[in-house]
Image (cartoon, helix red, strand yellow):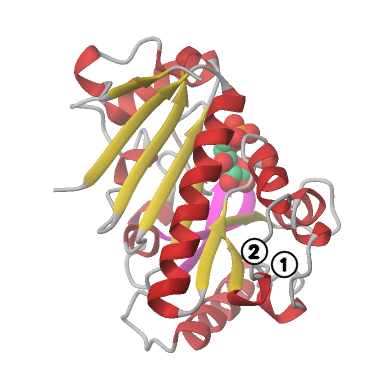
Amino acid sequence: MVNKSIEVLADKSAIVERATILVLEKIQTALQERGQCAIALAGGSTPKPLYEAIAAKSLPWEKIHIFWGDERYVSHDHPDSNCNMARQAWLNRVDFPPGNIHPMPTGANDPSADADRHDGEIREFFGVKAGEFPPFDIILLGMGDDGHTASLFPHTEVLQVRDRLIAVGNKSGQPRLTFTIPLINRGRCVIFLAAGANKQNALANVLGDSADAREYPSRFIQPEGELWWFVDEMAAKTLEANHRSLIIDN
Ligand code: 6PG
C-alpha cells in the first residue's frame, strides 16, 4: 500500500510554500540519517518558483547532490534545458560544489549512449550494481496535461523499461532522457506538483480508480516511500471527494 497524501491548496504559490516546507524537512531527515541528500529535480515551469524559494534558504549545500528526473536532449545552456532552468532559479545562486551537480549528459549526439552513461554515473554515486535501484531521498515531479511525468509519455516504449535506471523517452519524436518507473518508485519521498485547470482531466484520471496507466503514465508512480501530491484548486476541480484527503487554505 502506497503511503500517499493529496493536498489541495489554494493556488500555485500555496503549492510552492507547502512543497518548500516538505523539501526542507526531507533534506534535514536525509542529512541526519545519511549525512547527505540526493534530490532529483523536475523540469517544466511549475517547480521554478520552488527552486527560487529553496535558493533563499541557508543549507549545507556541500551535503546536497542534485540530479534531474528527466532532460530534454539539448545542450545545458539551451533555453529548453531543465538543467538550465534549475541553475538559473537555484543552483547558480548558492554555493554548490560543482561536483554536487549531476546533469543528465546530452552531448554525445546519441541519446541511448548518454542514457547509459548517466545510468553508470548514478550507479557509481550510490555504489549500486546492475539490477539494483538506488533510493533517491527526494524526487520532484510535474505532471503534463496528458498525464505524463518526467519524460514518461503515454504509450511510449520507455513505460516498459524495468531493467535500468535511465532510458530514452520520446515526446512527439523528440528524444529525452528520463528516470525509469522502477527508479522513481524506489524514491523515499516522491513529490508531484500540479497546478492549473489544464491538469484537471489528467489529475482525475491519474488519481482515480480505473484509468489505464499507459494512457496516464503518472499512475505508474507508486513509490516504496512517501507519495505526495500538491495540487491547486483549479487542477483538483474534478477530483471526486474521496480523493481529496485534505483541503489547505493558504
Ligand atoms: C519536462 C518535465 C515534465 C513536466 C510536465 C509538467 O521536462 O517538461 O519533466 O514532465 O514536469 O510536463 O510541466 P509544467 O510544470 O510546465 O506543467
Which residue corresponds to the image point at 35% horizontal and 10% vertical from the top-left? 238
**Does the residue tagged 1 have its C-beta within 8 Å of any atom of ligand 1?**
no
Please, what is the three-letter code of the amino acid marked with disc 2? Leu
Which residue corresponds to the image point at 24% horizontal and 23% vertical from the top-left? 243
Q: Is residue 173 shown in magenta?
A: yes
Note whether residue 148 is visible: yes
Please, what is the three-letter code of the amino acid marked with disc 1? Thr
Q: Is residue 116 shown in magenta?
A: no
Find residue 206 and report its image quarter: top left
Which residue corresponds to the image point at 50% horizontal and 16% vertical from the top-left? 10
Q: Is residue 213 above or below residue 9?
A: below
In terms of depth relative to the viewer, which is nearer, 193 or 212?
193
Q: Is residue 211 above or below residue 100?
A: above
Is 117 placed left or right of 96 in the picture?
left
Main structural element of the magenta stretch: helix, strand or loop? strand
Cα distance between the residues tagged 1 and 2: 29 Å
Q: Which residues are magenta?
A: 165-180
Q: Which residue is mark 2?
A: 59
Q: Where residue 250 appears, x then y in whole percent?
A: 51, 20
Find residue 32 and report its image quarter: bottom left
Q: What kind of element bears circle 2?
A: loop
Q: Where residue 131 appears, x then y in whole percent?
A: 31, 81
